[in-house]
Image (cartoon, helix red, strand yellow):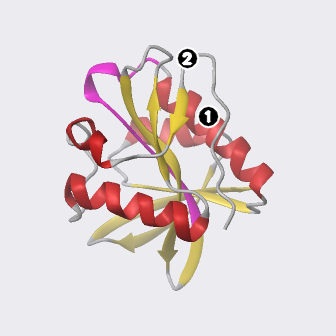
């Protein structure tokens, strides 16, 4: 499977996660049951299986900002390509998530993804704003991972 990597933006560049990123990944609010080490392993497996995953996003100087990328997600029996992002709390509200997510959306289009979604909890208003800024619109509400989730999406 060919691997993709989004092009750098003005303030960010992307790279694959490695075990050396464990302390940085531990600083993110990633939720779920994988834990930071499992998160890294899951993304490494995604790179191999799908050619994409969540990538580390850093400044050109090497400051860890968070992660952003694509994963395969099951929603009501259908497998969809999801754009996801997590930014360290200390650097939120500076446009990093939107900048990274837009680069990921553009790369997904080049890679041949036809429909892109973002799965967002109803209380996570900042992520809903990011989704709308990159052109995703609310499609439906579903029950996922034990609670309500909003599915934002767009055809690429």
Front one among 57 and 19: 19
Residue 84: horizontal and vertical position, in percent?
48, 49
Near mark 1 (Cα within 10 A), the count class, few <14, some 14-19 or many ≥20, is some
Position of residue 153 in the picture relative to residue 84 (left or right): right
Tag of residue 133: 1
Tell me the quarter of the image containing the C terminus.
Answer: bottom right
Name the residue rendered at 37%, 52% in the picture. 122
User: Does any portion of residue 109 appear in the rendered image?
Assistant: yes
Q: How many marks?
A: 2
Front one among 61 and 124: 61
Quarter of the image where one finds residue 100: top right
Indicate yes or no whether the magenta region holds residue 85.
Answer: yes
Position of residue 95 in the picture relative to residue 109 (left or right): left
Position of residue 107 in the picture relative to residue 100 (left or right): right
User: Helix, strand or loop at disc 2?
Assistant: loop
Q: Return the residue at label 2.
A: 11
Name the residue rendered at 41%, 20% in the picture. 62
Residue 150: horizontal and vertical position, in percent?
46, 59
Front one among 154 and 141: 154
User: Helix, strand or loop at disc 1?
Assistant: helix
Q: Are marks 2 and 1 in contact (CB under 8 Å)?
A: no
Range shown magenta = 81-94
């Amino acid at each position: 499977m060919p691997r993709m990597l989004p092009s750098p933006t003005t303030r960010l560049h992307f790279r694959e996660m490695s075990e050396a990123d464990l302390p940085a990944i531990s600083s993110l609010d990633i939720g779920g049951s994988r834990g930071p080490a499992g998160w890294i392993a899951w993304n490494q497996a995604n790179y191999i299986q799908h050619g994409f995953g969540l990538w580390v996003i850093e400044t050109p100087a090497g400051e860890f900002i968070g992660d952003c990328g694509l994963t395969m997600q099951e929603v009501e029996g259908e497998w969809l390509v999801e754009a996801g992002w997590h930014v360290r709390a200390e650097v939120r509200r500076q446009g990093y998530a939107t900048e990274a997510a837009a680069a990921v959306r553009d790369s997904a289009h080049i890679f041949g993804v036809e429909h892109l979604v973002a799965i967002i909890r109803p209380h996570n208003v900042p992520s809903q704003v990011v989704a709308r800024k990159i052109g995703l619109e609310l499609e439906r509400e579903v029950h996922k991972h034990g609670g309500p989730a909003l599915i934002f999406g767009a055809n690429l």
